[in-house]
Amino acid sequence: MIRMTLDEGDRVDRLLQADLGFHDANGGHMRHGLHAFAAKFPPQLPAWFIEGLTESGDVVLDPFLGSGTTVVEAIRLHRRAMGIDIDPLAVLMSRVKTFPLDSNRVLDYGTAILDHARSNLCHPERLLQRVAMRFVEEKDRQFVDYWFLPSTVLELEALMEGIEAVDEPDYRQFLLVVFSSIIVTKSGGVSMARDLAHSRPHKVATKVPKSAIDSFHKRILKLASTLTALDSPYEPVIQQGDIRQLDVVENSVDLIVTSPPYANAIDYVRANKFSLVWMGRPLRELAVLRSNYIGSESDKLFEWNMFPDRVRSILSALDVKDHHKAGLLARYFADMRQAMKGMYRALKPGKSAFIVVGTSTMRGLDVETPQSLASIAQDDIGYRLQGVVERSLDRDRRMMPARWGNRLTGIEQRMHTEHVIALAKPQEVER
Ligand SMILES: C[S@@+](CC[C@H](N)C(=O)[O-])C[C@H]1O[C@@H](n2cnc3c(N)ncnc32)[C@H](O)[C@@H]1O
């Protein structure tokens, strides 16, 4: 017989009865607004479970860290926080959000960088030489020339030089995130792209992008004011890594609140490479990394006997319609199974994991992602399923992808809601 600590189970039941939409609530730390990120969840969501289920000093893990929402809230609430993400920009922005930074110092650095950049812009030939040295690979140079106006390239190079000269690492990284935040925005920022944070980039030849110098100036002024202290006794552990090789001490985590990618939905590299390429990450390297993102288009699996019945029947139904897509979905479920296994191992017995995910429609078929993942977690891995509850999405805040092409994509058709899967590692197995 499987037994749970009654306390935790009851508390979870109560927490799941609340309205988990959090549309009206303002809350969380101001640092959440540092940088755009597709499919962030509202800070109130992790805070709700952290406050309801953990004490000061407990360990909270988010293995799909994204923009760091769970980690920032955990720190704000004086928990020990751990976060992992495969995406270098996600890791950078999450780290920066947790640094103890002084607003005046940020403003001083910002002013010095802007002065330096403005005077450098009087020497465009020198800046052009620096650009040639920054983008040694032809493909990177072509990418930058395609997506940025020549005048923007010079401005960005001038800013980057100033940022790279900052010798305090925490401030330098903060300034890199500010730099990135003027490029990777909903409207494509200073690039020629139409909608970067949400969707497949489209170049708009008629777009008149804002000046990078002015945008950086405005962001610095705005973001410096968000740097009120997080004031925690605990330093977070934030690492870049692949959740499928999660390396967290067994039975060490008190709570997981996380949101994995949807099946076949958002391509994070596609947007983030617009700023990562400026930070010395060649496109070639990012393309390799991309193939390891869960939900990416790169890998397929055509064997699904190992999944529970419910999942097998969804895969078979999709296979009849589209063999290729069924392979992608099977790969997604297999990756998520591996991820959930690692999370199970990391959790202390009796403790809970909340996985926030929406479904996708592929070839007109609802692939029931939340229910499928719940079934894999329970039938295959050994979690106890506490419930699967729906939460309504605030489309603007959650920043789901905009329309791709003329057709509504699967994710768009169903993205007014998503689900919270509540799982627990059983306290012990009694025979
Ligand atoms: C929906 S987002 C998380 C958003 C986060 N909850 C927030 O509020 O910002 C999913 C994240 O999963 C990450 N991811 C995708 N594949 C991964 C993998 N194999 N290992 C670790 N993280 C991965 C993506 O980079 C992305 O940041």
Image (spheres, helix red, strand yellow):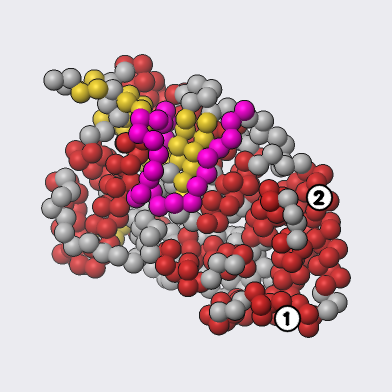
* The quadrant where residue 420 appears: top left
Compared across the picture, whether 364 is left or right of 219 comes to left
In this picture, which residue range is highlighted in magenta?
A: 233-256
Structural crowding at the residue carrying mark 1, measured as other residues with C-alpha within 10 Å and reported as few (<14), some (14–19) or many (≥20): some
In what element is the residue under mark 2? helix
The spot of residue 219 in percent (x, y) is 73, 55
Q: Which mark is residue 107?
A: 2
Compared across the picture, whether 265 is left or right of 234 comes to left
Compared across the picture, whether 261 is left or right of 180 comes to left
Spot the residue most to the top. Answer: 7
Q: What residue do we see at 69% from left, 51% from top?
A: 169
Q: What residue do we see at 63% from left, 47% from top?
A: 96
Q: Amino acid at mark 2?
A: Leu
In reply to whether residue 310 is colored magenta, the answer given is no
Q: Amino acid at mark 1?
A: Leu
**What residue would you read off at disc 1?**
128
The spot of residue 237 in percent (x, y) is 53, 40
Q: What residue do we see at 24% from left, 22% from top?
A: 428
- Which of discs 1 and 2 lies nearer the camera? The answer is 1
In what element is the residue under mark 1? helix
